[in-house]
């Protein structure tokens, strides 16, 4: 076969370009330390790289969710600690008030308790960023507001109103469905502040916070202010604690579980002798006492113990005759507070504050348990992040020492090819024309 000058030149340049291409490819890989720049470099590794990077991005997003959740719960836990401390301070004030004090001292205690209530409302409106932590999913609206609430009968009552909702906020930390009841990061108003009582105001339902409203009642008693929500014309039916029995109606809408009425003797379906307790059944005051603080006649029970029950006027209960009534039956009845009633404060008032503190501790314990769960999830995600990052590095990263050796080898081959090519290239006619 005849080998022409053009053929020799073409073959030489083709081999030289391939050597230069290998050198350029190695130089590109060395510039960023990555072994794969396009799927054609290694299709198998390219697919693995896509899978690893998707897992890595998802794991990083879940890790960020956990960090956000922990930040939310730490803010909530701090707020609950402050609320618990304020509740303890409220109890100290009530204990101080039940000691012999002049009215001026009670006014000062009431003023400090009023400040405690305002601080609790302020803490209840704690925000993280622009979101309220105790407002449920309605976290753009301030959840707590202390104001006067208009009752259906036109009277007004000071109360703390809750405008949030009771929906949970969950932050996904893994693939799968979200269970807000187990992994929620927030405490709703009802979880944090106790039951929410619904009252009607101008035809609309308004939710009020029981724990803070009880503190307001205690403050009013310290100031000698009767509860304006007490309406003698408003009669409420109450069911006996035992499974059988009649109803009791009373001239008040205020209810508190510390007050219990007990039937001691029954005649013709009606009690002829009763006792009452305002400390949950620990001690009882009988209608046989002299002078009596409670009396019963014809199914009408009259309570005149203004100190024990916090009522300036007698409170009257009407009992329905019932053949199922029997000695020992008990009823849980409503009571109202009014005047500077130190005995009411020492029993019912302290009972309210203790209940409030216990509720706050329970809510804080619950958020603490969830924090522990999210902390464990964070540790697991960080461990997964290290593993996935290692997989990505093993699949994509370039073996630098090996690549440097190959680059130097390619460079030497290229230079040698240039030198040999200069000697092997045949002379042309132009060389002889000189």
Image (tube, rainbow, N blue to C red):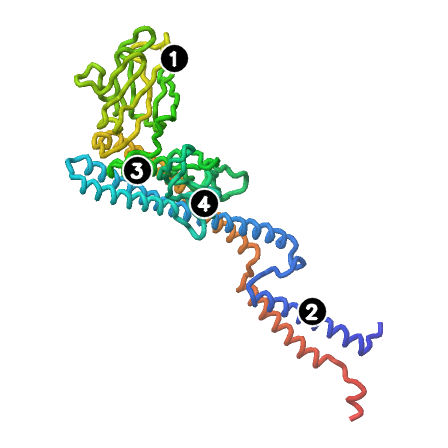
Identify the disc placed on residue 215: 3
- What percent of the width, then of the height, locates residue 90? 26, 40
Q: Earlier in the sequence, mark 4 or mark 3?
A: 3
Residue furthest right as drawn: 1
- What percent of the width, then of the height, locates residue 39? 66, 57
Image position of 373 (left or right of 304): right
**Residue at the spot of label 1:** 244
Residue drawn at point x = 29 percent, y = 23 percent: 315
Q: Nearer the viewer, residue 226 or 108?
A: 226
Measured Cα–Cα span from mark 3 to mark 2: 87 Å
Identify the disc placed on residue 158: none
Identify the element where label 3 is drawn: helix
Mark 1 closeness class: few <14, some 14–19, many ≥20 residues within 10 Å: some
**Residue at the spot of label 4:** 380
Measured Cα–Cα span from mark 3 to mark 1: 35 Å
Measured Cα–Cα span from mark 4 to mark 1: 56 Å
Mark 2 closeness class: few <14, some 14–19, many ≥20 residues within 10 Å: few
Q: Earlier in the sequence, mark 3 or mark 1?
A: 3
Q: Earlier in the sequence, mark 2 or mark 4?
A: 2
Measured Cα–Cα span from mark 2 to mark 1: 101 Å
**Taking 21 as reference, is 175 above or below it?**
above
Q: Quadrant of residue 176?
A: top right
Q: Nearer the viewer, mark 2 or mark 1?
A: 1
């Amino acid at each position: 076969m005849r080998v022409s000058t053009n053929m020799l030149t073409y073959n030489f340049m083709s081999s030289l370009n391939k050597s230069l291409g290998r050198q350029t490819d190695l130089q590109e890989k060395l510039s960023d330390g990555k072994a794969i720049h396009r799927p054609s470099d290694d299709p198998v590794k390219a697919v693995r790289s896509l899978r690893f990077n998707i897992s890595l991005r998802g794991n990083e997003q879940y890790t960020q969710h956990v960090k956000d959740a922990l930040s939310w719960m730490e803010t909530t836990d701090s707020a609950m600690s402050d609320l618990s401390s304020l509740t303890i301070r409220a109890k100290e004030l009530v204990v101080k008030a039940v000691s012999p004090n002049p009215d001026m001292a009670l006014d000062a205690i009431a003023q400090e308790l009023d400040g405690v209530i305002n601080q609790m409302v302020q803490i209840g409106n704690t925000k993280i960023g622009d979101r309220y932590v105790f407002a449920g999913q309605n976290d753009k609206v301030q959840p707590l507001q202390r104001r006067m609430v208009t009752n259906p009968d036109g009277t007004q009552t000071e109360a703390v109103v809750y405008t949030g909702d009771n929906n949970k906020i969950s932050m996904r930390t893994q693939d799968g469905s979200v269970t807000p009841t187990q992994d929620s990061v927030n405490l709703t108003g009802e979880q944090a502040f106790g039951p929410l009582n619904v009252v009607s105001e101008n035809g609309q339902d308004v939710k009020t916070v029981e724990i803070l409203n009880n503190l307001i009642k205690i403050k009013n008693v310290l100031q000698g202010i009767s509860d304006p929500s007490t309406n003698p014309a408003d009669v409420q039916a109450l069911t006996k604690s035992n499974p059988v029995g009649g109803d009791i109606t009373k001239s008040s809408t205020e209810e508190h579980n510390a007050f219990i009425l007990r039937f001691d003797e029954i005649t013709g379906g009606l009690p002829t002798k009763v006792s009452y307790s305002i400390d949950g059944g620990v001690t009882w005051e009988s209608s046989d006492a002299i002078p009596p603080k409670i009396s019963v006649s014809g199914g009408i029970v009259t309570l005149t113990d203004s100190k024990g029950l916090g009522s300036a006027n007698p409170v009257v209960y009407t009992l329905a005759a019932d053949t199922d009534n029997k000695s020992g039956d008990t009823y849980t009845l409503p009571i109202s507070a009014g005047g500077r009633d130190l005995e009411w404060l020492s029993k019912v008032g302290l009972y309210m504050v203790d209940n409030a503190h216990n509720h706050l501790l329970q809510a804080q314990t619950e958020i603490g348990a969830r924090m522990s769960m999210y902390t464990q999830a964070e540790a697991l995600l960080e461990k997964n992040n290290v593993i996935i990052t290692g997989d990505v590095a093993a699949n994509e990263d370039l073996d630098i020492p090996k690549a440097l050796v190959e680059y130097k080898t390619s460079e030497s081959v290229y230079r040698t090819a240039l030198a040999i090519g200069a000697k092997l290239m045949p002379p042309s006619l132009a060389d002889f024309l000189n």
